[in-house]
Image: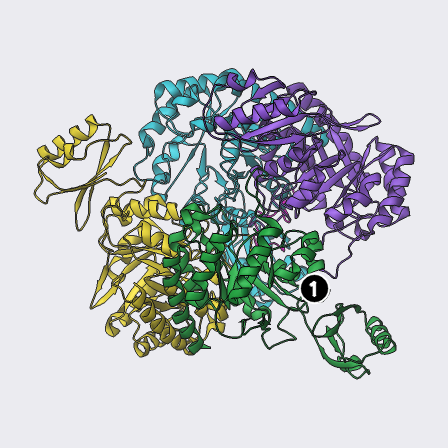
Chain colours: A purple, B cyan, C yellow, D green
Amino acid sequence: MIIQLQKDVNEQQKAAITDKAKSIGYKLSEARTQYGHYLIGIGKADFDIRQIASLPGIADIHRVSDEYKLVSSKWKVKPTVIDLGDGVTIGQGDLAIMLGPCSIEGEEQIRQTIQHLKETGVRIMRGGVFKPRSSPYSFRGMGIDGLKLWYKLAQEAGIKIITEVMQVSQIEEMYPYVDVFQVGARNTQNFNLLDELGKIDKAVMIKRGISGTIEELLYSAEYVFSGGNENLILCERGIRTYERSSRNTLDLNAVPILKEKTHLPVVVDPSHGIGIRHYVEPMALAAVMAGADGVIVEVHERPEQAHSDGQQTLNHEESVQMIERLRKTAQLRAEFV
Amino acid sequence: MIIQLQKDVNEQQKAAITDKAKSIGYKLSEARTQYGHYLIGIGKADFDIRQIASLPGIADIHRVSDEYKLVSSKWKVKPTVIDLGDGVTIGQGDLAIMLGPCSIEGEEQIRQTIQHLKETGVRIMRGGVFKPRSSPYSFRGMGIDGLKLWYKLAQEAGIKIITEVMQVSQIEEMYPYVDVFQVGARNTQNFNLLDELGKIDKAVMIKRGISGTIEELLYSAEYVFSGGNENLILCERGIRTYERSSRNTLDLNAVPILKEKTHLPVVVDPSHGIGIRHYVEPMALAAVMAGADGVIVEVHERPEQAHSDGQQTLNHEESVQMIERLRKTAQLRAEFV
Amino acid sequence: MIIQLQKDVNEQQKAAITDKAKSIGYKLSEARTQYGHYLIGIGKADFDIRQIASLPGIADIHRVSDEYKLVSSKWKVKPTVIDLGDGVTIGQGDLAIMLGPCSIEGEEQIRQTIQHLKETGVRIMRGGVFKPRSSPYSFRGMGIDGLKLWYKLAQEAGIKIITEVMQVSQIEEMYPYVDVFQVGARNTQNFNLLDELGKIDKAVMIKRGISGTIEELLYSAEYVFSGGNENLILCERGIRTYERSSRNTLDLNAVPILKEKTHLPVVVDPSHGIGIRHYVEPMALAAVMAGADGVIVEVHERPEQAHSDGQQTLNHEESVQMIERLRKTAQLRAEFV
Amino acid sequence: MIIQLQKDVNEQQKAAITDKAKSIGYKLSEARTQYGHYLIGIGKADFDIRQIASLPGIADIHRVSDEYKLVSSKWKVKPTVIDLGDGVTIGQGDLAIMLGPCSIEGEEQIRQTIQHLKETGVRIMRGGVFKPRSSPYSFRGMGIDGLKLWYKLAQEAGIKIITEVMQVSQIEEMYPYVDVFQVGARNTQNFNLLDELGKIDKAVMIKRGISGTIEELLYSAEYVFSGGNENLILCERGIRTYERSSRNTLDLNAVPILKEKTHLPVVVDPSHGIGIRHYVEPMALAAVMAGADGVIVEVHERPEQAHSDGQQTLNHEESVQMIERLRKTAQLRAEFV
């Protein structure tokens, strides 16, 4: 059960609602986000919703049978649109394209990528400054200084930034320079990180865990939403299976399933999803036909020289072709809705 | 190494080729199909291919580094086209659509399905007459009599038949009534069945194993091809993973990977691949954008009354919409090649 | 529901039982094995079991809520013991050890293995004469002639034979020379093969599928049992997962789970389960502590020269140590029951 | 390559070693732990080790071909023993038993558990005070106050504490009250947490990721070790697979594999590994026979009333039986080494 409170609800009214809910066997949690004020009821009893709906202070009330509540489409039928400002949105109906290198490597590389985005009309740039690496001896990214440099150049060009945050302590220092905080596949269930990202108002994109279920992804989003932040995007990036011909198994089934279960936008990462440069484009196109709201793809002027993930990174020429085809595919898909 | 022999090669010439190959460390297997006569060389030594190429009786010779040989695109670059007669082909460039119920249930149901195919211009009908079932107490299909009835009605309508063969002893009795023999996911590595299907000249579609690898699927095709039958189709139908939101995890990565590794046509089964009726269409469309040569989809006039798989079966109205969209998607995809 | 019929039940009595069952919503299948005569009722209705129990011709009646019936421990609490004759049993309480090479390769190898079994007091020898191989170009075994030779030597030594049957047509020719028919992991759901093995009276060991579930293994056993053969053994041999440090992931969880769900004996194959020679012994010992009724292990006088699976095969010296430890472990385990 | 430095090595000597390593293509990282001072060389070139070994300041030098270095048994053959003080050790040869509830719930429950440990001679108590939960609405543990209470009672009884740390900010507040910090399965690749745990001197037990590979577990341990902390324990707790009869698939293969690859002690968690109370004991015994240095098991005076994981928790009576059998099994296993 989700109770949307009126803006001017007072403590006395909340207490009355809580008491009433308790009396029918429901435990309420409060969530106050940038857009709304909610009480989430956890319980199993069947009851007449009007018993609560009539209490003062309530704007609306919904039954939500799913275990996750606030991210469910059962109460919020209209899709969530993420507005990054300057006319850049995700989930609006048109396809969001996010491009950039695996790792931010230096000024020259940033400039080349921004140039490529400008030429192709892409408005969101991806790139890692803090890199999670299996081995402690691998390149761990340029860190906060790399991010500041990137921000300066991106802002001049009107480009938005999406980049991975790995731990709670980074949120504050990264905040001024980031448009979308990405939660990586190894951190999907880092609940403390999710809790903290609930306290900010910038957009958060959560990647599905390395072998995370669709339900776990929704629960992780519920952490951020119930923590106070509705600006959420979900990302399918392939799961770990026994198959060894591809880096991961891109689970495009997740796209229509998520689109029905939640009101949040769904983005697909075909670069990690298949892990082989040559096959990234067809999987990006397939993602669009499956219903994705956007794609996030690794590109680099010279993939063979990239510090990481070069084998799954498109060069700019390949990227131009993919973007053109993505747009035509999105146009066709739009006819079908 | 694959050696294509001349049509009029004689035993003496073959012996000379075999001796030469042996002398450089290669063991040869002979394969004679409806279209060609080959010697497949298994070995690891590096050698000057001209040493063999100059021998009499040889039409062509190719190095093939893959472990599977005859199904590899390394020697046969031109895609294989399956010609079912009456202008029905698979792999020709246009999209092959195969529709029909999970199980053939009776004359009325067959007539309704054929009517639906006629109205939508679909030429290939799927349906099971021998059903593999986990439990011995489940419905096991109408058997050979169902197939004969189906054949009679399909032939009148100019419709081709694809149906599953479960064991060697069924091949002969099914042969007159079948256009494409389907090898099911539980039989992908039933090597005796594959051996026997190599001895016939009708088309064979092999489904990927329930948790089969892409490489194992190619090996299974190699069994049939080396046994004498080049009319082969591969089918991605979802793999078994930990994810429980869908029946299987449709691995669309397999499509571009297979299309590069082999010259055989690749078909996708979104019905089993996701297992939920409502999501079959988007996954079918995604399969086309990933590069599939065809799709095979379960449809039934009244899915809720189907003997099996009703939950993943489209009704005719849903099917009409899907077909129209599939064709538009295939048309767009064709522009990209 | 399982109805055990009296030996002298007549058709009229069976008809009366079937009618009664039908009237309460149950469909009955008949199964006649070497030991009993059963009617298996499939249905969901709740009913007073005495309504049926009092009918003439019935020896006993049991509710079985599991989807599989005859192999369930819900009706047959006493464990099934497989008696191979000459005092060789499986499931009797003591540990059954089955040893031998992956493939039968020739007389010398058979003699050496038998000698090793004699010296260690092991009574059951494993070995493949028909080999399922991913690639059509690999060694496919010595065939029926190898089996005849092996049988002659084994019989002289009082050794029992377990070997894999790959297809229906082999059953008859293999029958005189085999003590236990093994159904391999690629054939666990080859339902026609299971049907036919139900018609013979020799023991059958079914391996869990390459990525088969525990429930599917029980269903496959149900096929053989309901087909007429109660002499069944189940075998855990590792499942396919994402982990690449071992050939398969030996799922020892399956041992206590199967031991509770079914009355059939459970054997573990640590050779395929881990796939690395050096680790076979600890996994064999662990299997015993988990409650296995037996182990089946690959041994060869010179593993490095074996035609197949050499990397997971123990030499005779390693085997001697393992056997000794297996027996001590089984002895300790026996104290715990 | 691992270079063990002499205690009194000076900066000039280190610089000379680094230069030499660089000249043969190796990049060195420095690691200073509570027990040693190392330079870890990452590179691929083949070289004469004596070129470096003869430089002043070096105590010893080892080639380590594994990708992980400091946790490899290639350079440190003697097993690591974790000494928790008061005669409590892990990895010493005898079996370490860790028992306790999933969550610490209150004083009464702590007292009952400690009493149970005292009576059975178990010295290490497990329990969660910060609980990672999929849903934000579930019980998240008693927090630091619960830990302080627990510590007071445990210390009086001479019992050591192992408990999970979920984020960097908790380390400092937990430090005085913890003997072993546990890194949970959702945090195995939380590299920032691992980095910080490298800076303390208390023992750390790292659980394998929910679908982590054995190699990733070793890499995660390398993070902590190279960060400065050698007091490390690895824990197999089951992996996520398609099988649904058990909560996870306990991968006992990991035990002998890890025992050979690393010098660190290996503990098994059968409670999470199978997830069903009734089967925990056989899996614990199997773990010992596979070679585990210890087991960690959930027990509770009244499992049916536990706040979490009750279905996989033993009651004290079951625990007494398991402990007795574990010790007998460990005794037998010791004879085999």
Residue placed under numbered mark 1 in the picture: D200
Where does the image place residue D257, in percent across and percent down from the top left?
54, 66
Position of residue D141 in the picture relative to residue C173 (left or right): right
Question: From where the camera sits, is residue B123 visible?
Answer: yes
Image quarter in which the C terminus of chain B is found: top right
Structural crowding at the residue carrying mark 1, measured as other residues with C-alpha within 10 Å and reported as few (<14), some (14–19) or many (≥20): many
Image quarter in which the N terminus of chain B is found: bottom right
Position of residue D14 in the picture relative to residue C22 (left or right): right
Query: Magenta includes C274?
Result: no
Where does the image place residue B95, in percent across and percent down from the top left?
59, 28
Q: Chain of mark 1?
A: D
Please name the residue shown 35% across and 77% down the image. C116
Does A176 appear above or below D204?
A: above
Question: From where the camera sits, is residue D254 visible?
Answer: no
Q: Main secondary structure of the magenta part?
A: loop
Residue D60 appears in which quarter of the rendering? bottom right
Residue A296 appears in which quarter of the rendering? top right
Residue span colored magenta: B65-77
Q: Secondary structure at mark 1?
A: loop
Query: Magenta includes B74?
Result: yes
Which sits in the foreground, D332 or A234?
Answer: D332
Disc 1 residue type (three-letter): Ile
Position of residue A246 in the picture relative to residue C336 (left or right): right
